[in-house]
Image: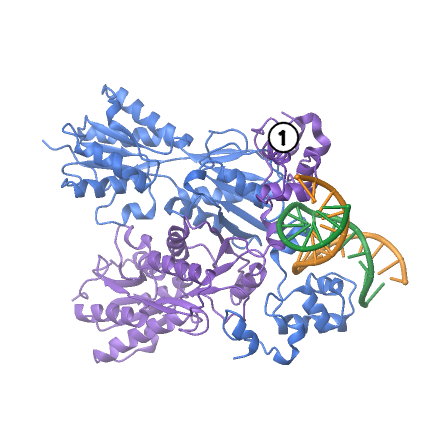
Chain colours: A blue, B purple, C green, D orange
DNA sequence: GTGAAAGCGCTAACAC
DNA sequence: GTGTTAGCGCTTTCAC
């Protein structure tokens, strides 16, 4: 094992670097000056060669390139983006990598692939004390220096004027400010609730989403509208907060299902909550759907992969991600479009809903 | 609409910045010097205040903080990480955001949440001409400046000595070099093939994975071993390349299933390939599993979410991601551990396998 | 064709 | 307590 390998963390060097040349080959990153020194030229020349600028003698260029590959030099994204204007990377800002955001990510990745842009998905310091405003912070930290544009997933606050193009997916506000993408939350929620009503349910609970998100408010609205339409009075005790998260759903679900007059059906604001409701039901000895019907929202892959496949409202997540990417790409291309795209949401009836127990 | 909002891309500013103060409030990013100027102090002082360093008068600090929040200043990740040593950011280097890598991402995200580290998943310029060596390039571009440590997903080449800790998931080489995590590829593949044999299949095809990945080699090995064990001769024509990708599986699958002596079962090296094999089978009018049995590998959520749920070999992807994160965290903490973790893989029989047609 | 120098935004020594 | 200075790694004039 060479001296440098012993001090580093990686595997052996695959190129034939000469350990004798230690002075010009530090253990840390190989920088542009390391290359310059080893090639006997200035850093400016190395930069020109590496970036394919004109005005370098062929012989010099060749020599530099040889050193570059021998040393395994690669220009630092950080340093170059600090100096340059464009970085060619698109940022995806998320609070957390969970099924919802990763589905969008797949869609974005597919749409961006082959365009020459690189993707940088960033989940920046979202702590419990700090759940609000993360997107503003992340954006400020990256914009203008690291990324050329950003798609922000479920931003909870209005972000200030930014110097880079931004599109928001499932934003706090409805269509307002920057370009946005969302789906038909009200319509989807109405369809879900109506489905339950049509099966014969009357006591239908709702596990709400994150109260700082427009989508959660709209889904609750759809639920209320369908109930009203069916002539069923809203019972406040049957509406609880699940925060779109499994962990936050446990308690509300337990309370809801432990009531003597428990609901016969639950419409959860997203699949993560719905799935947890089902788990809690099982813990309490209730069978789904015989004793309890459950409907979710989103149609993440996990929704249909359990033993009991979830009846849910599908949002075209991959397509929403792809669309967001296309919009951002267009803006990056100079199109000043500010769009508010609305995608359809449709009910998919699977195995977690049935008529109420007799 | 204010002048700055008109020139920027974002929504309206939520803070009460004074448009009159235009000179000190450029449209681009708010920088530390903007803050310094507005607060009437030096940039050094602002830096101290923002980073909570001692040696600043309470009154000054207060004034600076007021300006910071008024202007919405946030320190640039790029600039500060260029200067600082530690960035508190962990990089996840992937070729692409597809179901496999995003499952790992979920696991990593869960394990890292609450540790104070931020996550930066990077999918850097993987073009068709450039499928090999991306991880080396990405690592060089980010290491030492942007990220403190990295987990690399399915690296295809040995990476050179790095200055930062690295753990590789499903690497090119088996256990060698840096810390690695993989699962029991041979055992899983044997179980899958044996399952097919036990159902009565004799003509069992294999759609190989990426030939530059150790896991693909091992899965093929398991397939061969099980065949030999059952006394079934290997038929080279029944082994094709699918490259772990749906798109690359289409042609091989079509050829395989169009043969007059087509196989009655296919063991695909991963779920993406298996799912595509099923699609192709349907196109050709074959029913799964009545006419053709199919087994995959990985158990991504998509495997069990279709109408026909895939029989597959499950790798504990989320756990593998979480484990990788823990190992990296430990290394970041100074532990010089170089580990090679091996996780179990187990067959899950679902709906795409049955005895061969009579 | 090449290199010296400035500067991107920031932090850390070190003066004052 | 505060400001001045140097410099992280790189790109880009602009002299030579």
Q: Which sits in the foreground, B56 or A137?
A: B56
Determine if residue B292 is in view: no
Rendered residue at 57%/52% (across/down)? A117
Rendered residue at 77%/66% (across/down)? A56
> Which secondary structure lies at badge 1?
helix
Vertical placement of A102 versus A227: above or below?
below
Q: Position of residue A46 (x, y in %)?
A: 72, 65
Residue A197 is drawn in which quadrant?
A: top left
In this view, which residue lies farthest toward the left?
A: A358
In the visual, does A225 lie left or right of B131?
left
Q: Position of residue B17 (x, y in %)?
A: 63, 28
Where is the C terminus of chain A found, in terms of image quarters? top left
Q: Position of residue A17 (x, y in %)?
A: 61, 77
The residue carrying mark 1 is B5
Vertical placement of A350 versus B134: above or below?
above
In the visual, does A351 lie left or right of A16?
left
Rendered residue at 38%/53% (across/down)? B111
Q: Position of residue A89 (x, y in %)?
A: 57, 51
Q: 10 Å neighbourhood of mark 1: few (<14), some, or many (≥20)?
A: some
The subunit carrying tag 1 is: B
Tally the numbered discs: 1
Determine if residue A288 is in view: yes
Q: Which sits in the foreground, A105 or B91?
A: B91
Q: Which sits in the foreground, D5 or B277?
A: D5
Residue A281 is drawn in which quadrant?
A: top left
In the visual, does A251 lie left or right of B21?
left
């Amino acid at each position: 094992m060479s001296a440098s390998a012993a001090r580093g963390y990686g595997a052996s060097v695959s190129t034939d670097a000469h350990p004798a040349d230690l002075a010009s080959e530090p253990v840390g990153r190989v920088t542009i000056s390391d290359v310059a020194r080893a090639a006997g030229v200035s850093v400016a020349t190395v930069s020109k060669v590496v970036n394919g600028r004109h005005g370098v003698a062929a012989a010099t260029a060749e020599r530099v390139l040889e050193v570059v590959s021998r040393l395994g030099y690669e220009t630092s994204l950080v340093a170059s983006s600090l100096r340059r204007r464009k970085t060619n990377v698109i940022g995806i800002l998320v609070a957390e990598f969970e099924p919802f955001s990763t589905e969008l990510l797949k869609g974005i990745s597919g749409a961006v692939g082959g365009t020459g842009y690189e993707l940088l998905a960033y989940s920046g310091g979202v702590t419990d004390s700090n759940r609000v405003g993360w997107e503003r912070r992340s954006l400020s930290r990256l914009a203008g220096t690291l990324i050329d544009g950003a798609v922000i997933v479920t931003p909870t606050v209005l972000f200030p004027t930014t110097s880079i193009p931004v599109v928001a997916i499932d934003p706090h506000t409805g269509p307002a400010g920057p370009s946005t993408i969302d789906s038909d939350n009200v319509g989807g929620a109405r369809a879900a609730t109506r489905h339950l009503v049509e099966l014969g349910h009357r006591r239908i609970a709702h596990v709400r989403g994150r109260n700082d998100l427009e989508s959660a408010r709209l889904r609750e609205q759809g639920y209320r509208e369908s109930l009203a339409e069916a002539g069923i009075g809203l019972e406040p005790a049957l509406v609880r907060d699940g925060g779109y998260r499994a962990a936050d759903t446990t308690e509300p679900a337990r309370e809801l299902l432990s009531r003597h007059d428990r609901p016969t059906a639950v419409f959860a604001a997203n699949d993560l909550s719905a799935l947890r409701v089902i788990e809690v039901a099982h813990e309490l000895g209730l069978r789904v759907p015989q004793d309890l019907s459950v409907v979710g929202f989103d149609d993440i892959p996990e929704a249909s992969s359990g033993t009991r496949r979830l009846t849910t409202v599908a949002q075209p997540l991959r397509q929403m991600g792809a669309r967001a990417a296309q919009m951002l790409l267009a803006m990056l291309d100079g199109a000043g479009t500010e769009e508010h795209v609305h995608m359809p949401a449709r009910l998919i009836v699977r195995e977690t809903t049935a008529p109420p127990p007799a």
